[in-house]
Image (cartoon, rainbow, N blue to C red):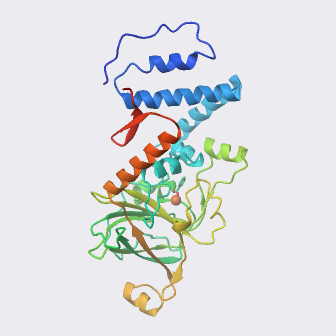
Amino acid sequence: MASQSNAAPPLLDLTIDNITPNTNRINSQCNDRRLVYLMTRLVTHLHDFARETRLSSEEWMAALNFLVGCGQISNDVRHEFILLSDILGLSLLVDSINHPKPPLSTEGSVLGPFHTHDAPTMPSGGEMSSDPEGEPLLCVCTVKDTHGQPIRDVKIDIWETDSSGHYDVQHAGRDEKGPSERCVMLSDAEGQFWFKGIKPVSYPIPHDGPVGKLLEKLGRHCWRPAHLHFMFEKEGWDHLITALYVRGDKYETSDAVFGVKQSLIVDLDKADKATAEKYGVKEGSWLLKHDFVLVTKQETDDLKDKNALEALEKLGLRMKLVDHLPIPELD
Ligand code: BEZ
Ligand code: FE
């Protein structure tokens, strides 16, 4: 724990105008300069929000009750705060800041609350869906670097909903039945991996809690366009969390969680005879071919630093970067 200094300012007669600097001062006594910076900016923006909106006591209490409600409905598999971050655009924003993408690399998308750590590892060709109602989809993919060279042994997590638009964890009895519509695979020496899933469907994000009520009040729908999730991990490479969206979905341009990017919209094809024989699927099955492009950790860190320094300079802030994160320049 960071050590604390005893030089706390006297906190007396605080007013609309001096509450902010005083709160920041009392929060600035620890040695963790990143924490001090985060708290100072948070308090400053929160207080400005209250001053600018003339926040009423009723609104303040409603907001607190909203957060209490988010906590009360959350459990191991229901993450209402992630949903809140998603529908406020914060998840997409944080991902974009932390995983900037050079041209031609695969863009990121929202993680969402339904990734799990217990997906079965399968060799290429594995069937990751056991849903008999789903329309079979063969996915044939590669993972390469920005120079077109294949990357082997990348760990790829893949997950999607069943044909009813639910993730396995949203069904009762998941503990006994185990994971479904999800798998983990490794890319081969040519950077290839392929699997059998089902054609994704659009589905509503969980909307029976406080976040759903908020969307309704805002006149927003709660739907996500049809997609498949992918997560790529390999030492030395930037962790990529992304998704592929099926072109033409009704919600393509109004995703409730802002995850869609043009470069992630894909066309589905139908497997011809040769493809069907090669991959052991029925001729005419849905087919998705996609090449993912990863970026090295070094390239990402350099781009992240460059973007951070440019953004901070534009804001007129004197900052230095420590571990790629800004803290105020004191000297
Ligand atoms: C998802 O795509 O799984 C998802 C993302 C954000 C909120 C809810 C679900
Ligand atoms: Fe999803």
Residue drawn 52% across the image and 30% down it: 42
In this rendering, position of residue 216 left or right of residue 134: right
Please state the horizontal and vertical placement of residue 163, each as a whole percent of the image: 55, 68
Which residue is rendered at x = 41% and y = 37% of the image? 326
- The quarter holding residue 76 reads top left
Viewer-proximal residue, 252 or 308?
Answer: 308
Q: Front-most of 270 and 316?
A: 316
Q: Position of residue 228 (x, y in %)?
A: 49, 66
Left or right of 86, for residue 182 = left
Q: Quadrant of residue 6?
A: top left
Considering depth in this image, is 65 or 264 the residue closer to the camera?
A: 264
Q: Residue at x 59, y 25 (%)?
A: 47
Quadrant location of the N terminus in the rendered image: top left
Q: Considering the image in quadrants, where does the C terminus appear?
A: top left
Q: Is 71 situated above or below 152?
A: above
Question: Is residue 250 visible to us here?
Answer: yes
Q: Is residue 59 above or below residue 89?
A: above
Residue 65 percent coordinates (x, y): 62, 30
Q: Is residue 18 above or below residue 40?
A: above
- Write the residue at 53% across / 26% down: 43
Residue 172 seen: no
> How many marks do you count on the picture?
0
Residue 277 is situated, as x and y percent measured from the top left of the image, at 40, 90
Foreground pick, 79 / 297? 297
> In the image, is residue 321 above or below residue 202?
above
